[in-house]
Image (spheres, rainbow, N blue to C red):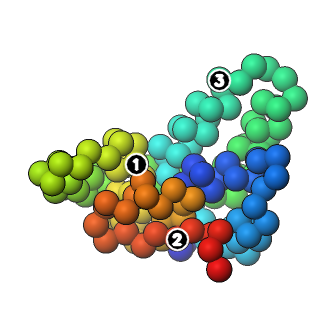
Amino acid sequence: MRFLLDTSIVSAALWKLPDPRVLARLLEHGSECAVAAPVWHELQFGCRRLPRGKRRRAIESYLEDVVRATMPILGYDERAASWHALERVRLTTTGKIPPFVDGQIAAIAAVNELALVTLNLKDFRTFKGLDLVDWTKA
């Protein structure tokens, strides 16, 4: 495994006009990707909030048949929790308070030594030592 995919990347394939660069990289690196349990939660929560219908069924199918079937879902374990706690202390002492879930995702990437692929680089730049990747860039 090389990459941990953020919610923004996993959901990009569902856009009405998906970014072809993201789709190409998903196809190229799909077997090297994982998702974090908090990302899985965000995806499931977003899907389950939709009214029952064609769009929701399509998203459910994508999440089960593509994401869950082909990518490991990495948990927020003791190592990740410890890394996250240390980063929260460091950041809060400098006046920065990132969203808790972003810290969880960053921690899972960090302790598993995976590059974090996201379209929201600014959300993760404050975390120390992360390898951040934006698949829309050349």
Secondary structure state at the residue bearing disc 2: strand
Can residue 65 be seen here? The reply is: no
Q: Quadrant of the N terminus?
A: bottom right
Crowding around mark 2 (Cα neighbors within 10 Å: few <14, some 14 to 19, many 20+) is some
Label 3 or label 2, whichever comes before in sequence order: 3
Upstream in the sequence, badge 1 or badge 3? 3
Q: Amino acid at mark 1?
A: Asp
Residue of label 2: 133
CA distance separating discs 1 and 2: 15 Å
Kindly identify the amino acid type of the residue bearing the numbered disc 2. Val
Lateral position of residue 98 relative to residue 113, left or right: left
Q: Is residue 114 above or below residue 119?
A: below
Q: Is residue 101 left or right of residue 42?
A: left
Spatial CA span between label 3 and label 2: 29 Å
Where is residue 120? Give x, y as percent: 51, 56
Q: Which residue is located at x 82 percent, y 32 percent?
A: 55
What x and y, as percent, mark residue 17? Answer: 82, 52
3D distance between C-alphas at marks 1 and 3: 21 Å
Q: Quadrant of the C terminus?
A: bottom right
Q: Secondary structure at mark 1?
A: helix
Find residue 123 and report its horizontal and vertical position in percent.
42, 54
Specify the farthest residue to the top: 51
Label at residue 102: 1
Residues 86 and 66: in front is: 86
> Which is in the foreground here, disc 3 or disc 2?
2
Answer whether labels 1 and 3 touch (C-beta < 8 Å): no
Q: Which residue is mark 3?
A: 49
Residue at 63 percent across and 69 percent down: it is 135
Looking at the picture, how far across and down is residue 68, in whole percent? 66, 49
Is residue 82 positioned above or below 101 on the image? below
Label 3 residue SS: helix
- What is the crowding at mark 3: few (fewer than 14 residues within 10 Å), some, or many (at least 20)? few
